[in-house]
Image (spheres, helix red, strand yellow):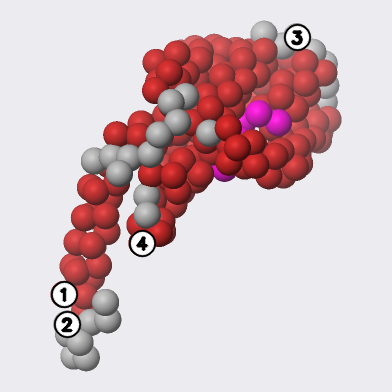
Amino acid sequence: STAPKGTPIHRVVRSVLKGIGSSLVDLMNRPRMRLGLVFLFIAQFGIGATNPQLELFVGHVEPDWAQGKVQQHTAYLFSILAGVGLFAMPVWGRYGDRNGHGKVLVISALSAGIALCVSGFATAFWVLLVSRLLLGAFGSGLGPAAFGLAADVTGREERGAANGAVFSARALAISLGSIVGGVLVHFLGLRGIYIGSGCLLVIAVFAAGPRLLVRRADS
């Protein structure tokens, strides 16, 4: 609601923050919404942990390439991921509408985990290329599925708050994943980051997948 004219700005801010906090608490009290957000966070965290290492990993896989060639082919890998995802996201969205968004979350996370593990064992650039194609084709389903799941468990008046929570979970996971990945690479190595991130997604699927596959909405 609109604050009365002349209301001090700090009261307006406090009222807005209180409303946001109340909405988040209500959303997190819904088991399926909470499960979906945590699952999405873990999946995006694992993928995000590998992003800062990609250029270094290309150079590691192809040590004879000049720096300029490494940078150029790294750009190809990022572009392929985004390009494939651009076309795959609407497909996953429609599939989720028909078969359940929880199912799409499970398929996307499991496939992305496998793709990351394949990257970790890559011995040539073409293997990285194939794994990025798989990651773009399947990992791109995480976003549409998460937003669809949020729509399933909330009413129209809560839809904005639910979508905001999904967006925030993704952004936070990618940001923290990049930072943590940059630290852990010194302990796990470049291959270890990719394999470890892939295993994290696979473990998350086996832990939460059965509950996500059940098609139901919280009242």
Rendered location of residue 67, percent (x, y): 78, 29
Near-viewer residue (179 or 96): 96
Question: Magenta residues: mostly which secondary structure?
Answer: helix
First reached walking from the N terminus: tag 4 or tag 3: 3
Q: Which residue was labeled with disc 4?
A: 157
Label ID, residue 11: 1
Tell me, yes or no, whether the two marked residues, 1 and 2, touch with CB atoms within 8 Å: yes
First reached walking from the N terminus: tag 1 or tag 4: 1
Q: Which residue was labeled with disc 2?
A: 8
Tell me, yes or no, whether the two marked residues, 2 and 3, touch with CB atoms within 8 Å: no
Q: Is residue 131 visible?
A: yes
Q: Bounds of the magenta span? A: 137-144
The answer to whether 206 is drawn above or below residue 67 in the figure is above
**Which amino acid, by three-letter code, is at mark 1?**
Arg
Near-viewer residue (162 or 182): 162
Q: CA separation, marks 4 and 2? A: 27 Å
Q: In the figure, residue 36 lies in which quadrant?
A: top left
Q: In the figure, residue 127 lies in which quadrant?
A: top right
Question: Which element type, helix, strand or loop, lies under badge 2?
Answer: loop
Q: Quadrant of the C terminus?
A: top left
The mark lying in front, picked from 2 and 3, is: 2
Question: Which element type, helix, strand or loop, lies under badge 3?
Answer: loop
Q: Which residue was labeled with disc 3?
A: 123
Rendered location of residue 175, percent (x, y): 46, 40
Tell me, yes or no, whether the two marked residues, 1 and 3, touch with CB atoms within 8 Å: no
**Which amino acid, by three-letter code, is at mark 2?**
Pro
The mark lying in front, picked from 4 and 3, is: 4
Q: Residue at x 72, y 11 (%)?
A: 122
Rendered location of residue 156, percent (x, y): 40, 59
Question: Which element type, helix, strand or loop, lies under badge 1?
Answer: helix
Rendered location of residue 106, percent (x, y): 52, 24
